[in-house]
Amino acid sequence: MLRVIGLLLLIPLFDAVLLVALATGVIYPIRPLVVVALVVLTALVGMLLVRAEGRATLQSIQRKLATGEVPTNELVDGGLLIAAGAFFLTPGLVTDAVGLLLAIPVTRYPIRAAVRRWVIEPYIDAKTGGFASGQVYVGGFPNEDGQGPATGAGGPTGGGSAGSSGFDPDDATDVDFEDSEN
């Protein structure tokens, strides 16, 4: 998490360095007024792109909801478009480039997949104990000391040591209640 915050703090620094380098002519001799016009133009074009993509995403959400489907990808796209809008509103060429990556559908799809894999799924697993993704331990009772899952048959190791969990499936009896006469 600290790496992400550090990266987000470095983006404005890169923006400032690039703008100063362009305005002073270190990289390429451009007049400062042209640099300011370029920043404003990229922000305006980017906001128009975010607006159009936002409308398309909203229509897709409404279409999926009307058919009874869950619009998970569309909701992630909506969040990425909000982030893109924030990047476009921040003055600078680097932030506009990041906003453009988030706004264009071709580059947004791999970013959406990465966000789902490394942000959303771990968060949901942490909040639900693994029930949402199916990463739930179903191996039986904890060890005798009450700590951790059992490592016996059906445990996380896949079977083997029946003595460590205290339950031996070969020693268990099968009770048939229909044959009992009480």
Image: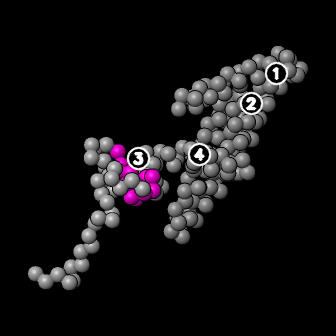
| Sequence order check, earlier mark of 4 and 3 | 4
Q: How many marks?
A: 4
Distance between mark 4 and mark 3 Cα atoms: 17 Å
Name the residue located 13 percent from the left edge and 83 percent from the top edge: 181
Q: Is residue 80 left or right of residue 153?
A: right
Q: Quadrant of the C terminus?
A: bottom left
From the top left corner, tell me how far across and down residue 165 is, in percent.
32, 52
Q: Check disc 4 and give the amino acid type.
A: Val
2 vs 3, front mark? 3
Distance between mark 1 and mark 3 Cα atoms: 47 Å
Residue, disc 4 = 115
Distance between mark 2 and mark 3 Cα atoms: 37 Å
Residue, disc 3 = 127
Q: Check disc 2 and give the amino acid type.
A: Leu
In the picture, residue 85 is in which quadrant?
top right
Res 132 visible: no
Numbered range of the magenta stretch: 148-159
SS at badge 4: helix
Using the image, tell me which numbered label, if any, was put on residue 67. Answer: none
Using the image, tell me which numbered label, if any, was put on residue 22. Answer: 1
Q: Are marks 1 and 2 in contact (CB under 8 Å)?
A: yes
From the top left corner, tell me how far across and down residue 2 is, in percent.
54, 28
SS at badge 3: helix
Residue, disc 2 = 93
